[in-house]
Amino acid sequence: MSVNQEFRPKIVAFCCNWCSYAGADLAGSSRLSYPADVKIIRVPCSCRVNPMFILRAFEKGADGVILCGCHPGDCHYSTGNYYARRRMTLLFSMLDFMGVENGRTRVEWVSAAEGVKFSTVMNDFVEKIRSLGENVRLGDLRCKK
Amino acid sequence: MQEVKNRALALLKDGTVKRVLGWRIGENTYDPEPAFFESEEDMQTFVYNNFCAANLSKYMIEASKLEGKTLVCLKPCDSYSFNQLLSEHRVDREKTYIIGVGCKGKLSIENVKRAGVKGILSVNDTDPLQVETLYGNTEVSYKAAMLDRCHVCKGKEHVVYDELIGESEDTSTADRFAQVQMIEAMSPAEKFAFFQKELSKCIRCNACRNVCPACSCRKCVFDSDKFDSAQKANVDSFEEKMFHIIRAFHVAGRCTDCGECSRVCPQGIPLHLFNRKFIKDINTLYGEYQAGADAEARGPLTSFTADDAEPSVVAEGGTK
């Protein structure tokens, strides 16, 4: 039974253990709210995120995927987020090239002290995905439905 | 070219090399196939003509594990692939003797057929091509029969070789990124329709993966643990659905743009577009980079600078 007909997007947030996950924690302990549509997956480093993770999230029904990591230069492992940055830039560009709306993917650098930023970013991203609506394209790139 | 054959035969005879990796004559002029030759009798079927389009560098991965030296014939574009494999330590330079063969653009029988020629009996590789068909003789211009990739050739200089035989001729006539730019200019809906139309033709034969010199992993993510034909029929899996984009990403920064993927695709999917899009982005964002040009260079995805573009550059249209 659906009480509320409003579209609730499914959003996956990959958060690095050292900065963004702690930032989310801070947002929580500071009583800052962000939509419950965001599902956080903790990863050791933003560099851990294989482009396939993002594609898989979309294939499994996510409407938006956001990757959060330490600010460039602040990576716990020194350089991980620099590699992640290049990879994600290329992946997002490829998704755009294939006709997937480029608002559905995002990278944000959130430090452990930025609980407010975490909450603003998530609110903003959820709003963006709501305006884009349900993701239908990346479910299956190959088959004609 | 008789010269290549004679030289290969001489090196095989005097024991410099144990085997020759080249092309064996097929049933017709237009279907030579990659082959190893180990004796003088084998070499009778050796051929190098303008239909010898296959990139032989990938075969050197296996040949590097064999005893003794292997002679390999590489065209200018193949030498980039070989150099890239060299930088990834997948081939052994010590066990390779490279004859850089000249290239004046390679031909494709598919393009001859596309030019409207039917019932082909035989064809030669001169300019223009003399085609004998069921309906009489006809001519096709060399340019029309040339592989699409040769129109955007990246150069006729061998980047790695032991000796060079034969003349090369510049064949590039078009801008390499023209097609990519054309797609970039479309609306998201048009782009998606274009790729869905192309990719829905895919039969997952894995030919593009098997031929690709950059796809040299011993264990591939697309291999299922089932055997034989079941191995390929991964219909519902994630890998199946996202095959092309994942494969393109796996070779990003290492793809030399040799164009073999599109050449072997039995369904005619323009697979090189994905690779070229990555190359174009890398060139725009991280500086000009040609994979395989320098075996010592670090790839764009295994290096970084502190002031790289942020991923939001895509939404701002900075990669177009």
Image (cartoon, coloured by chain):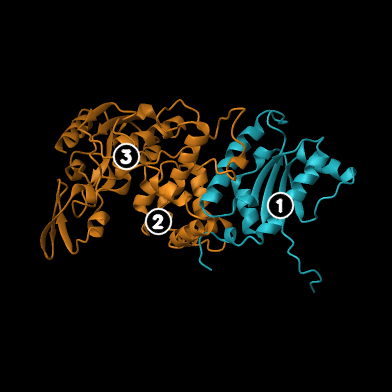
Chain colours: A cyan, B orange
* Disc 2 packing (10 Å; few <14; some 14–19; many ≥20): some
Q: Mark 2 or mark 3: name the one nearer the start of the chain.
A: 3
**Three-letter residue code for mark 3:** Cys
CA–CA distance in space, label 2 to label 3:
19 Å
Which residue lies under the disc numbered 2? B269
CA–CA distance in space, label 1 to label 2:
32 Å
Which residue lies under the disc numbered 1? A12
**Can residue B298 be seen in the rendering of this structure?**
yes
CA–CA distance in space, label 1 to label 3:
42 Å
Whether marks 1 and 3 lie on the same chain? no
Q: Residue at x 23, y 59 (%)?
A: B113
Whether marks 1 and 2 lie on the same chain? no
* Disc 3 packing (10 Å; few <14; some 14–19; many ≥20): many
* Disc 1 packing (10 Å; few <14; some 14–19; many ≥20): many
**Can residue B227 be seen in the rendering of this structure?**
no
Q: Residue at x 41, y 32 (%)?
A: B292
Please state if B58 lies on the left or on the right of B169 as rendered: right
